[in-house]
Image (cartoon, coloured by chain):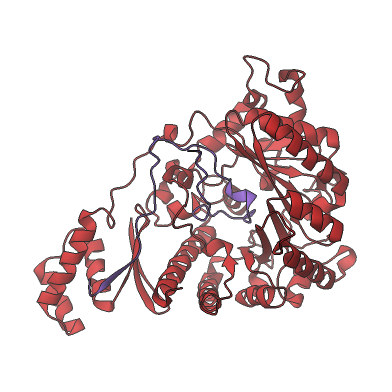
Amino acid sequence: MKHIKQIQKATVKVPSSGHACGECQTSCQSACKTSCTVANQSCEAIQ
Amino acid sequence: MVHAFFMIDRHIVYDSDSGAFFELDEISYDVIRLYIDGKGQRPSVELLNDSVASHKTSILELQEICDDFDSIIAEGTLFAAPIEYDYHHLYPDQPRIKAMCLHVCHDCNLRCTYCFAGTGDYGTGHRSMLSVETGKAAIDFLIAASGNRKHLDIDFFGGEPLMNWPVVVELTHYCNENGPKHGKDIRLTITTNALLLDAEKTAFINKYMKNCVLSIDGRPEVHNRMRPGIGGKPSYEPISKRIKAFVERRRSDESTYYEHYVRATFTRHNLDFSEDVKHMAESLGANQISVEPVVAPEDCDYSIHESHLPAIFDEYEKLARYLHGRRAAGEPVNFFHFNMDMSNGPCVYKRLKGCGVGAEYCAVTPEGDIYPCHQFVGVEKFLMGNVSSIHSILDENKHLIEGKDATDILDQDTLQIFYDRLMPNRESCKTCFARYHCGGGCAANRYFSTGSLDEEYRVGCELAKKRLECSIWLSAASADSQI
């Protein structure tokens, strides 16, 4: 594609279980404390 | 939702439902805007003809660009179908408290002007220390309340937790002994102003704490203005010295863990906060940095208003350029709010739940009182219970008595208030391209800035959107430089 460059493929994942596993860190346990960012958290799904 | 924007030197289109993004040239940028106006439909020949003249191009070339966009849309990467969800998708069974901000100490050895903890006492008028007994009850509560969740998190918080160091040490060992007995992996964090940080505490933190957050506001004059010691004494010098030494050891082989953040707060007095990031990176040697906007009542002389947004947006762009320069030079600095975990990021349901306030996350005071999060401590209407109640539903081995549930010791009405306000129920989030990035934002920010859990905190929303644009720009710039 001459005019369009893909930087990032699709990243928003829907778990195959059909629901969250609840294992990931809450964002306020990192460096937020007065705001909220969740997209930088890693998935910690127990396989 | 598809969002197209121009930042610094790049035209970008991002789809929040797929998470994919593309860099465009000027012609394809104008074409994607026609698609956005047409809600994903290929623009008509008449509309394309209008672009022919402005770009000195041919209708054939524009049709080719449309063909490319059509194939991207067909594969579901742009104009992706919105993900359908309901509350039962958000948890494997029911919401479970599994992360705790444990207030080891309601006292502090600094007198920060903007402190949401009222310089340590959370506005209570009395300063207090967590006892080992109450701390253990809090950990017992967390283990019991977490049900079948394996990964639990505790943040030793304050006030200043190093002022109650022997309790931190004892509770750390208690977690390490009792977590595995119940099949739990308890990850520990400590958030400190570093004033009492010495070699011995550093060694302990590096051995046992998965994460450490160190507070300093950047340049000496900025830090001393907002983070004075007791009696107004400047605190930059001792704190910067200790943080520099800590960071060096944290990054060395002696440390079991690496994760740490040197964390600053910016106010309207330092809207040039990219200079503070530079200072922390270049003078303190920090390469893990977080800088947060202050949240304060509107009438404070340091609070951030909507009128400050243009200056802050410019500063975020300046920061993005600086971070890109560091990456290009092989000396990357990880800026917390510009990070996106591309390869192993959270699933969509985590993105919908946000921080977990009052549902998966809580704060416990030195008196054992349980609140939805550390910022709500002291707001009596959100008091959820007390950890001392846990003793009545545990047996001698600290297992739940059959038929009991640790969540039952919490005030069910308060729990419901926070469940009901998760992002899927927030109207303003439904049309926001950043909704999967901030997870609906911070409930405490909304409450303390507007007086309501339901009102939108517009400054916070606009800043979250800008940070997302910056993180996308950084990815595009890195891809271009093959970093």
Total residue callouts? 0
Q: Is residue B286 left or right of residue B224?
A: left
Across and down, in percent, residue B311 comes to: 54, 75
Question: Which image quarter holds the N terminus of chain A?
Answer: bottom left
Q: Residue at x 62, y 55 (%)?
A: A32
Q: Is residue B160 visible?
A: no
Q: Is residue B15 left or right of residue B465?
A: left
Across and down, in percent, residue B42 comes to: 16, 62
Colour of the chain lettered A: purple
- Which is more toward the observer, B115 or B182? B182
Q: Residue at x 77, y 18 (%)?
A: B396
Q: Is residue B416 visible?
A: yes
Q: Residue at x 67, y 31 (%)?
A: B143
Q: Is residue B71 left or right of residue B354?
A: left
- Which is more toward the observer, B219 or B37? B219
What residue occupies the far bottom of the structure in this picture?
A: B56
What residue occupies the far right of the structure in this picture?
A: B231
Q: Residue at x 55, y 43 (%)?
A: A24
Picture quarter containing residue B290? bottom right
Across and down, in percent, residue A7 comes to: 36, 66
- Which is more toward the observer, B158 or B126? B158
What residue occupies the far top of the structure in this picture?
A: B402
The red chain is: B
Q: Measured along the vertical axis of the image, is residue B50 above or below residue B127?
A: below
Picture quarter containing residue B40? bottom left
Across and down, in percent, residue B336 comes to: 58, 62
Q: Is residue B107 left or right of residue B145?
A: right
- Which is more toward the observer, B402 or B463? B402
Q: Measured along the vertical axis of the image, is residue B271 above or below residue A41?
A: below
